[in-house]
């Protein structure tokens, strides 16, 4: 399978995040989340779906794989490609990140997006997707996917940081796509520390997590510096903070959140999805938060 811009020169991505599907049998809130996902897929014929983690709860969940399967079932019978990365809550139980990822990839009824340059270190996967132009002659956009982990192994902050191995992976593979006119994107779960600066330069959306909090790692391992030096990263898309859904700019890079999608979790923000439209004709990227009231 080759991902490419359509005949009109557009490629549309749906970001789903923090669905937090609970234990089986599913609660009313978890079922409502699945209804939202299916309704969004029905209404918006997108070219790719990216789930940026916390697909399910896992701590204290006895049937996590059944819960995970209920999400995957939303994609059965659909041609829309899916790619997922994991959040901190996806591996708090007895099932490892490798096992969760392998279970997802083993579902042959899901149209899995074609990953390239795959690296898995310490159960954390980094990979990329190539999006070809409408003429399918060359790669026009690269989608980077990095598993941001869960919790640090040493006593330093609440959340893990992107590892040096992952930073080195990005630096190496990005050299294959040096064109400064590309509008490449990165998706991960936990926001990078630079989101704190981007929060001072918001162009759209809300900054409502706690007392204007960004729940990022305390340590900065330098990924954002590599994004800036790459010279062709349009934006970074995260999840994790349910009451943040802003688009802010720092050092010329958009730092965005998805619209929290799950009902079986905390947060006052309306549930929904984020749509990202890449336009090959004028080489632009636009995004829109779609709320549940406009979907269901």
Image (cartoon, rainbow, N blue to C red):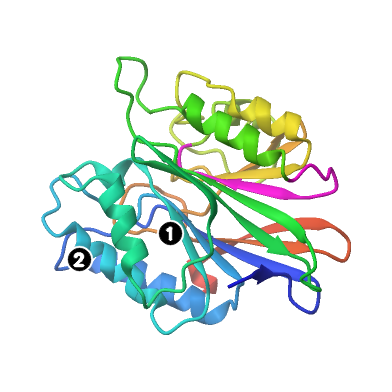
Q: Percent from the top left, x then y, of residue 2?
A: 63, 70
Residue projecting furthest to the bottom: 77
Mark 1 burial class by Cα count in 10 Å: few <14, some 14-19, many 20+:
many
Q: Percent from the top left, x then y, of residue 234?
A: 73, 45
Mark 2 burial class by Cα count in 10 Å: few <14, some 14-19, many 20+:
some
Residue that appears at 59% across and 78% down:
45
131 magenta-colored: no
* 25 over 8 or under it: above or below: above
Residue that appears at 21% across and 61% down:
65
Q: Which residue is mark 1?
A: 261
Query: Which structural element holds mark 2?
Result: helix
Number of numbered tags placed on the structure image: 2
* 291 over 117 or under it: above or below: below
Q: Which residue is mark 2?
A: 66
189 magenta-colored: yes
Which stretch did the figure color magenta? 177-190
**Which secondary structure class fits the magenta region best?**
loop
Quarter of the image with the N terminus is: bottom right
Most foreground residue, 97 or 73: 97
Mark 1–mark 2 distance (CA, rounded to whole Å): 19 Å
Query: Which structural element holds mark 1?
Result: loop
Q: Find residue 179 and report its image quarter.
A: top right
């Amino acid at each position: 399978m080759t991902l490419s811009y359509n005949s009109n020169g557009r490629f549309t991505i749906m970001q789903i995040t923090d669905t937090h599907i609970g234990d089986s049998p599913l609660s009313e809130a978890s079922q409502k989340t699945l209804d939202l996902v299916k309704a969004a897929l029905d209404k918006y014929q997108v070219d790719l779906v990216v789930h940026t983690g916390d697909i399910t709860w896992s701590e204290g969940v006895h049937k996590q794989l059944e819960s995970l399967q209920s999400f995957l079932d939303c994609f059965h019978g659909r041609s829309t490609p899916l790619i997922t990365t994991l959040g901190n809550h996806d591996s708090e139980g007895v099932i490892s990140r490798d096992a969760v990822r392998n279970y997802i990839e083993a579902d042959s009824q899901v149209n899995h997006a074609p990953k390239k340059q795959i690296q898995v270190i310490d159960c954390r996967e980094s990979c990329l997707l190539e999006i070809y132009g409408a003429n399918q002659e060359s790669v026009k956009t690269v989608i980077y996917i990095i598993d941001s982990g869960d919790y640090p192994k040493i006593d330093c902050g609440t959340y893990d940081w992107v590892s040096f191995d992952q930073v080195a992976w990005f630096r190496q593979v990005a050299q294959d796509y040096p064109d400064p006119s590309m509008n490449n994107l990165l998706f991960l779960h936990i926001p990078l520390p630079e989101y704190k600066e981007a929060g001072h330069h918001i162009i759209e959306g809300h900054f409502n997590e706690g007392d204007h909090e960004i729940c990022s790692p305390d340590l900065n391992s330098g990924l954002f510096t590599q994004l800036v030096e790459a010279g062709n990263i349009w934006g970074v898309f995260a999840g994790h903070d349910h009451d943040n859904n802003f688009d802010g700019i720092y050092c010329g890079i958009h730092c965005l959140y998805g619209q929290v999608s799950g009902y079986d979790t905390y947060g006052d923000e309306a549930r929904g999805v984020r749509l990202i439209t890449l336009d090959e004709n004028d080489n632009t990227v636009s995004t829109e938060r779609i709320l549940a009231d406009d979907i269901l």
